[in-house]
Amino acid sequence: MQDITIWHNPRCSKSRDALNYLEEKKIALSIIKYMDAKLTKEDIKEVLQMLGMGARSLMRTKEDIYKELNLKDENDEEKLIQALADNPKLIERPIVIKDGSAVIARPLEKIDELF
């Protein structure tokens, strides 16, 4: 069995689909309900490194909070990371992590890249 972590939002259908996908494969997993978990900047930075992307690429740019915070015009990576930590609704989901690598599971089959 493989140990996997999923940053999960139970209210998101894509996140529920990813969780079901992993459970059907009988994979041992840890679930982080990131909307409640109070992620730190360090947590975000670690996942960004595993994903191989910058903060803006992890952001849900169509969320109202993105517009309210005027993040479109923000170029400071530290401020973008802080915005993700302060507003987890901005985090694209679901994120699946295994052995220092991660994927945003959209489409769902992206999870298979971790195996």
Image (tube, rainbow, N blue to C red):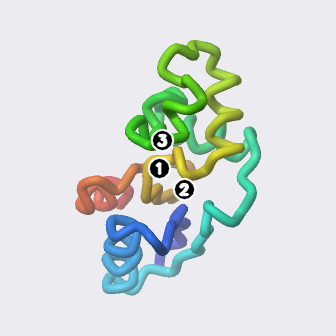
Pick the residue in front: 17 or 72: 72
The image shows residue 85 at horizontal and vertical percentages of 69, 43
Q: State which mark lies toward you, 1 or 3.
A: 3
Residue at position x 41%, y 75% in the image = 19
Q: State which mark lies toward you, 2 or 1.
A: 1
Q: Which mark is residue 99?
A: 2
The image shows residue 88 at horizontal and vertical percentages of 61, 50
Q: State which mark lies toward you, 3 or 2.
A: 3
The image shows residue 110 at horizontal and vertical percentages of 28, 54
Which residue matches tag 1? 102
Find residue 68 and report its image quarter.
top right
Marks 1 and 3 sit apart, C-alpha to C-alpha, by 26 Å
Residues at circles 3 and 2 in contact by the CB criterion of under 8 Å: no
Does 97 sit above or below residue 42?
Answer: below
Q: Is residue 46 left or right of residue 103?
A: right
Which residue matches tag 3? 64
| Kind of residue indicated by mark 1 | Ala
Pick the residue in front: 95 or 76: 76
Marks 3 and 2 sit apart, C-alpha to C-alpha, by 34 Å
Marks 2 and 1 sit apart, C-alpha to C-alpha, by 8 Å
